[in-house]
Amino acid sequence: MEEPTIGMYEPAPAPYYAGWKRRFFLLLAIVLLVPVFLVVYALVRFGGDRPVVYDTPEEHFKYGSTGGERESGFPYWIFQALPQVCNHLLPGGYRSLGLIFEEGKDLPIGMSRRHYLGLDRTFLNCAVCHTSTVRRSPQDKPQIVLGMPANTFDVMAFERFFFDCAADPKFTASDIVPEARRLARARGEDIDLLDRYLIYPIAVAIMRERLLMLRGRFRFVLHQVDQGLLWGPGRVDTFNSAKVLFNFPMESLDPKELLGASDFPSIWNQGLKRNMQLHWDGNNTLVEERNKSAAFGTGTTPPTIDLKAIGRIEEWIEKVPSPAYPFTVDKELAARGAPLYKQYCASCHGASGQDFSGERVGKVTPIDAVGTDRKRLDSYTYTLAVNQSTLYAGYPHRFNHFRKTFGYANMPLDGLWLRAPYLHNGSVPTLRDLLAPAAERPKVFYRGNDLYDDKNVGFVSAVANESGRTFFKYDTSLEGNSNAGHEGPQYGTHLRAEDKAALLEYLKTF
């Protein structure tokens, strides 16, 4: 057997080692740099928290974020696609819900946009409940008024659309993503490959599961719908929604507390309303707590609320005045109404539309004295007040001002002409009707029209349809809709017709 030659163990030529070294270091670079690249890409692609920012407080109020997109936001292009995907559930699109679109804007007033965790998201903000439009004549272009009650927006229909669409067989990535991409490309944008084939399909699945979960928790509302107890435009059941968020056993609660629908309020002159009892039932005396509580309706939670953004809104509504009455006022007749207002109204509602002094202004009148529908009062319970005190536990702004009351708060009347329909549940269409005894007030009228009724001081309410729009039929005989109360000698409903006319004219100046 031959001995192996030394040549069998000789080193490889230098070019061989040079090539091997290059391959080694290239492989090492790949091993080291690819994870770094992926981390950087993930941070750029899925990191960041960037709300769309607006220069003026008015634009910020209309379209700025409160932080709700972080937890509750809809992926932006999915939100845009759903009216087409589920068009059998919403043939008129989002406009048919009473949302207001400005020319050149891709979202309605009251919805904001934020890039968060790799997705552009959108959700509600304060303006969705506190902005509406007014037409002075049928031919006029609607004028947007910030801070007034959103009397055309149907929040119950908004919720039902998303709940029903999520339960529909078409709520799938294969239906939604192509429609979302079509809309994006029509606007000069696109949804990239990662979004199309991974992120958006996952988002659709998560969104569907969360909406169906909420649909189950809001079964009590769907039961009201089956009974014909719709809220209608301009109204919301604020505190029963809060109970859902606190995981109250809604199905086993006392039925008398499950129907608290009431009108959206106006939000002007907040600085002048400090220390008053706030909300319809006066359950809080701190403006900042009331604002943070309202922010839960825009999808925020204690960890996700954008305090800086909400601070801009708070600063603006501190001083923003109510709009002046735009129609002609008979000054002589109004002057005759001023002493009548002082006699019958000023102690509860303030010396004037901008002077909120009065011994009972911002204080609660017991329900037996005011006599209005008590459903909203009964919906806010002692148990809920206790639970609200746990919100922001561990934060410097923990809630500690919520209390159960036994009546409704007397509010100032700034911008009164824009706050129709009247009473807390919006059961009286015009101021002229409010000055009549309850037996003479309209039993049935229509809500959701923005055409103004200058003669009666309110919005047109006797018309069921206009230019293809169908308005909401409000029946005062239904539970929670009573138009009784706020009547008798102390409220001026016994006055002579000429005195009522004078008082009505003076109230226009508010």
Image (cartoon, rainbow, N blue to C red):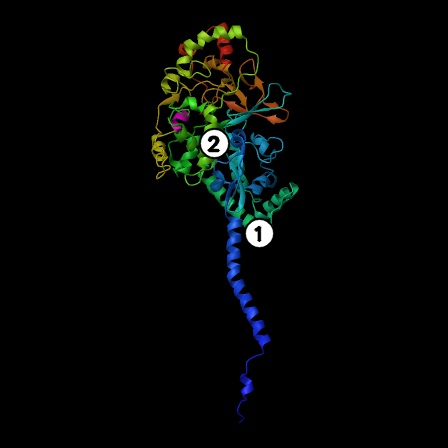
Task: Using residue 402 as the reference point, say whether residue 33 is left or right of it.
Answer: right
- Contact between marks 1 and 2 (CB within 8 A): the answer is no
Spatial distance from mark 1 to mark 2, Cα to Cα?
36 Å
Q: Position of residue 414 (x, y in %)?
A: 47, 18
Q: Secondary structure at mark 1?
A: helix
Dot 1 crowding, Cα within 10 Å, few <14, some 14–19, many 20+: few
Dot 2 crowding, Cα within 10 Å, few <14, some 14–19, many 20+: some
Of the pair 492 and 189, the residue shown nearer to us: 189
Q: Which residue is tagged 1? A: 194
Q: Which residue is tagged 2? A: 312
Is residue 303 in view?
A: yes
Of the pair 246 and 270, the residue shown nearer to us: 270
Magenta residues, start to end: 373-379
Task: Give the residue type that dot 1 points to.
Answer: Leu
Q: Position of residue 48 (x, y in %)?
A: 50, 45
Given the current orientation, which residue lies at the most extreme front position? Answer: 14
Of pointers 1 and 2, the one earlier in the residue sequence: 1
